[in-house]
Image: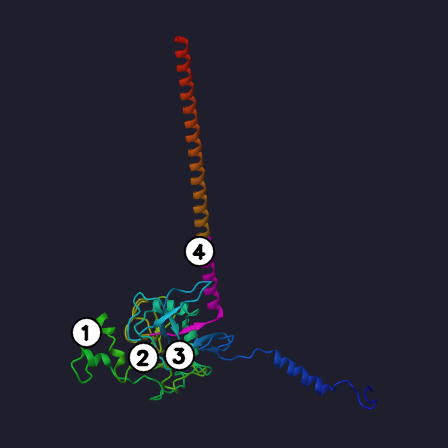
Amino acid sequence: MTGPSPSRSTRPSPRASLAAAACALVASLPVVVEGAPPCPKGMVSIGGEYCIDRYEAATVVIDAPPTAKRKPKTLRKHSPYEPIDDLQVMAVSEKGRVPQAHISRDQAELACRNAGKRLCLDDEWIRACRGTKATTYPYGDEHREGRCNDAGLSGFNKLFGPGNNVPPEPSAYTATNMNDPRLNQLPGTLAKAGAFPQCKSSAKAYDLVGNLHEWTADTAGTFRGGYYLDTHLNGDGCNYRTTAHDRTYHDYSTGFRCCWGGAEQARIDRERRAKEKAEAEAKKRERDEAKAKKAREKAEAKKKLATKKAREKAEAKKKAAAAKARRDAAAKDG
């Protein structure tokens, strides 16, 4: 085996060293793809700071909320045309699913939490909608017909009005009528997630304007973005904001999507861990108290048994002494 030729240097050139260092640096950087850190599957990153669902959320019915040791088991899909009521549901964000309407702010929050996510803060939602150029609509500053589902037909007028798309009398606007499952199944009303491909933000989140109002984390009750009949009345596009209803309100126009990550997620996770720790400690105290109670009961039972045996022994001894005394007396008399 011969060594290198003395006419050639074995040390790499400065250019080669620089290229190698660059390659090493690139190789060390994280590869960001949907479904991998920093965003869970079905979400998109907003400036690398937090994630938001790509599509408006649908829901599935689950057996129980998640814990530190188990994930929820999906039982069935929940109808997007029916209220949640007292069901335990979990948020899912999927293209082609009809998003969940008839949901309140608190129900939406729980659905997000059951999915390991959370409702978006108002400023997070606005930032995701307006995109990197801070536009009025997800696609730009000027409204464009047909980009989003924001020029639909009123199923409410059709079902409860006098005809010819004339609004009904005020008395028709009851909670029952506003949550009628037929409303969003009529043509020209609610669309499937992603059905309007041009209604997307710079981060490629769809339907942030139109289709369904979207609840945010505001505990006073705020939903944003408008719905398929109105994206202007309470502000244009991404600036649309409704605060007229409390956190328990729901109707055929109210929907949601979830966020994940960021400082808010860290705060929620800390609270969740603290709650789980407190619950675990409370259960341990209950177990310890039950164990101590059982030990006390056992000790008391043992003491009672010992007392009973001692009493029985004393009584037997007393009876034996009495019997002996009688025998002795009888022998003396005899």
- Circle nearer the N terminus (4, 3): 3
Residue type beneath disc 3: Glu
| Residue for badge 2 | 227
Residue 163 screen position, x and y as percent: 17, 83
Can you tell which of label 3 and label 1 is closer to the viewer?
3
Give me the C-alpha separation between circle 4 and circle 3. 34 Å
Q: What is the C-alpha distance between the residues marked 2 and 4?
A: 41 Å
List the residue tagged with mark 4.
279
* Secondary-structure class at tag 1: helix
Q: Position of residue 267 (x, y in %)?
A: 47, 65
Q: Which residues are magenta?
A: 255-281
Disc 3 to disc 1, how far (Cα)?
Answer: 34 Å
Where residue 68 sits in the image (x, y, percent)?
Answer: 46, 62
Question: What crowding class fits label 3: few (fewer than 14 Cα within 10 Å), some (14-19), or many (20 or more)?
Answer: many
Q: Dominant secondary structure of the magenta stretch?
A: helix
Amino acid at the residue labelled 2: Tyr
Q: Considering only vertical position in the picture, is 239 above or below 63?
A: below
Q: Residue 315: x and y, percent?
A: 40, 24
How dense is the environment of label 2, judged by Cα within 10 Å: few (below 14), some, or many (20 and up)? many
| Label 4 residue SS | helix
Instruction: Name the quarter where the N terminus is drawn.
Output: bottom right
Residue position for label 3: 94
How far is disc 4 from disc 1 in space, using C-alphas?
A: 46 Å
Q: Is residue 167 visible?
A: no
Is residue 111 among the parts visible in the rendering? yes
In this view, the residue in front, 62 or 249, is 62
Q: Which three-letter amino acid code belongs to the residue tagged 1?
A: Ala
The disc, 2 or 4, on the residue closer to the chain's N-terminal end is 2
Question: Which image quarter: residue 222?
Answer: bottom left
Q: CA distance from mark 3 to mark 2?
A: 19 Å
- Give the mark nearer the N terminus: 4 vs 1: 1
